[in-house]
Amino acid sequence: MRHIRFVLSVIAVVACAATAFAFTVEPVPEWNELFDAHRVTGVVLVYDDSADRYYSSAPLRINDRFLPASTFKVLSSLIALETRVVSDETQIIPWNRTEREVATWNRDMDMREAIACSAVWVYQELARKIGPERMNFWVRRANYGNGNTGGAIDSFWLDGNLRVSPLEQLEFMRRLKTGRLPFSKRNLDIVRNIIIRGKNEWGTIRGKTGSVTQRPPHVGWYAGYVENGDRTLFFVTLVEHPDPAVIAPAREAITQKILRDLNAR
């Protein structure tokens, strides 16, 4: 891959004013062609820990904040475990027999199954049991996004006040992988295990998608990391489009293409 290389200095503020650090991002304008090919807009941010380098299709957008949607389920899982709302990833959460729009959601399931199919009702039930005070405490302690859990306890990550940027999503994934989050090693191990999305020639892929479709702007997230030996690529893809149906296939295809190209280098 040919890069037009120049360095852009970025000051990143992660969760609070006291946590600021300076770093450089290498623009990769070729990645914007992938967005154009899918007729979407957005941004990709990647951190290669083996080279200690950040890359982005649009470095000036890595601090733009949006609702996290279902990417928040990663942190929500950690909080549910830490507060003992669930004992582990195999505890069954009973379905209340309310029919949801996604057929695979209409059953009893454990947290591993719920995060795999992104079952909203399961995480709404967990959030209600965690409660506003404990939820707010742990979101802030984890330095997640703007730390604002205002809104309904069972939907603030979907339509409330919580906002997170691509940079904050990526740094959260880095802290999850390295254990620099305020949760027990046991609970970190459980969550790192349940967000495995597959294994291929690149290594083991962990991550979570999310879509903001209830109100504009409609965006789709894919945040995670892929481990291959001593190298880990952390990635965040944010896709924007007025039609929510376009978002899911675009974010997946763009992310897969970029990871494939980076792993070939």
Image (cartoon, rainbow, N blue to C red):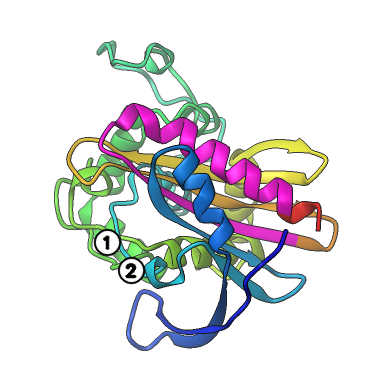
Task: Reply above or below: 189 against 12.
Answer: above
Left or right of residue 157: residue 251: right
Q: Which quadrant: the C terminus?
A: bottom right
Query: Who's the residue at 28% across and 16% down the image?
Result: 100
Task: Give, as a three-letter code, the residue at label 1.
Answer: Asn
Q: Indicate the position of residue 243 as horizontal and vertical percent values.
A: 28, 31
Q: Indicate the position of residue 81 as horizontal and vertical percent values.
A: 48, 48
Left or right of residue 24: residue 114: left
| Residue 238 covered by magenta stretch | yes
In magenta, the rendered stretch is: 232-261
Q: Main secondary structure of the magenta part?
A: helix
- Looking at the picture, tell me which residue is in the foreground, 190 or 204: 204
Q: Which residue is mark 2?
A: 140
> CB atoms at circles 2 and 1 under 8 Å apart?
yes
Query: Who's the residue at 28% across and 10% down the image?
Result: 97
Query: Who's the residue at 83% across and 63% down the image?
Result: 230
Question: Marks 2 and 1, how far apart in space?
Answer: 6 Å
Q: Which quadrant: the N terminus?
A: bottom right
Instruction: Report the disc number at residue 76.
Output: none
Q: Which residue is mark 1?
A: 136
Inspect this view and state whether residue 92 appears: yes
Q: What secondary structure is marked by label 2?
A: helix
Query: Who's the residue at 69% across and 76% down the image?
Result: 52
Task: Reply above or below: 8 against 179.
Answer: below
Give the image quarter of residue 195: top right
Inspect this view and state whether residue 183 appears: no
- Looking at the picture, tell me which residue is in the foreground, 20 or 142: 20
Give the image quarter of residue 5: bottom right
Q: Indicate the position of residue 95 as horizontal and vertical percent values.
A: 35, 17
